[in-house]
Amino acid sequence: MRIILYTGKGGVGKTSIAAATACKIASEGKRVLVISTDLAHSLSDSFEVKLSNEPIQISENLYAMEIDSNVENEKKWGNIKGYFEKLMILKSKETIETEELLVFPGFEELLALIKIKELYDGGEYDVLIVDCAPTGETMSLLKFPDLFKWWMERIFPMKKKGAKIMKPIIEPTMKIPMPTDDVFDEIENLYAKIDELHSLMLNKKIVSIRIVTTPEKIVVKEAKRSFSYLHLFDYNVDGIIINKIFPEESIKGYFEKWEDIQKQSIKDIEDSFNGIPIFKLELMKSELRRYELLKKVGDNIYRELRPEEVLFKEQIFSINKEEEGYILSVRMPFVDRRELSLSQNGDELIIGIKNEKRCFVLPKKLQSKEVLGAKYDDGKLNIKFA
């Protein structure tokens, strides 16, 4: 099964492109499910069909759904939610505000990813197409498994045994209920799912990301930043789609100045993402709605290519042996070296690009080594260990 995620700045047409891709693949005989993780769902509007938290058939081989975080919250939270609810209403009654506070920041994104993993495990479809939220929320979605795994391994080691020892002391004195075995079991089960999810998302044979942009300088800059952030978290980007290109016959009079802007932006994309497949779609005469038009658009974008295939694969992290030690190279183009940060804490390495940071455990061959220096050159961060 293949999983393809579409992301990009808000308003670039991710939903339409994701839906069009799904229509093309389904028309060629593959069983496809297109799902939306965006809280402001618009997939229903694309197909002009009311979608829900369960797959609904759109046409032969094509199914669609919009993930409802409230429904998934009730299904997955269970005992964990009940425990935190007890803590929060110790001194007050249960209210709507309490219910809202029980949805932690990032938890909705996590529930969406777990749902994707469940659909993958179910094996009912050949391809999962994911219509993601705008770039910032998508980064929250994609980096959450990595952060949650790190947090669980360091903050949660007390587990059941410690809780049982502390229960007779804490509950009578602090008047705070300790987690039961059911709560711990659920947390451990959640952690196991996150661990499996993390491995799945980094499997470049299964998961790839496609960035949707428009030929405007601001939007192209965000596409480049997204590309760098995705590489930092070791995700494979296998396609760039340039959407809403003005047809030549339409760039007259009032819109004439857009011709140079578009040409410059398209050239910038082609030069910057050289090697990665780039697809172009002109602005349509009407809104992209209904299966027939979406299928036509999917054919226009991919032509003879099979969009369900991995269109490009690049090695992002590499380790090279040298006489004086090792070089860990991370491919991250479009980065301003002044926005890079690097630190080491034992066997962990923390790399930052502006406001995005990733903390990860070093490969075994580097765990006994120390960082001697680093250099950003030709789109790569080269870190020297000895």
Image: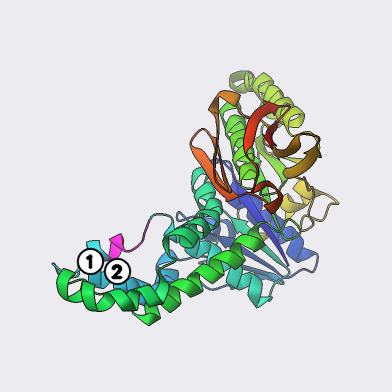
Residues at discs 1 and 2 in contact (Cβ within 8 Å): yes
Assign the N terminus to one quadrant of the image.
bottom right
- Residues in magenta? 99-104
Q: At label 2, which amino acid type do we have?
A: Phe
Vertical placement of residue 215 versus 256, above or below: below
Query: How many residues crowd mark 1 within 10 Å: few (<14), some (14–19), many (20+)?
Result: some
Pinpoint residue 100: horizontal percent, then vertical percent.
29, 61
Res. 343 visible in picture: yes
Does 102 lie within the magenta span?
Answer: yes
What residue sits right under mark 1 in the picture?
Answer: 88
In the picture, measured across the screen, residue 235 lies left or right of residue 299, that is left
- Amino acid of disc 1: Met
Residue 276 shows up from this direction: no
Residue 62, picture quadrant: bottom right
What residue is disc 2 on? 84
Which residue occupies the foreground of this view, 242 or 166?
Answer: 166
In percent of width and height, residue 346 lies at 55, 46
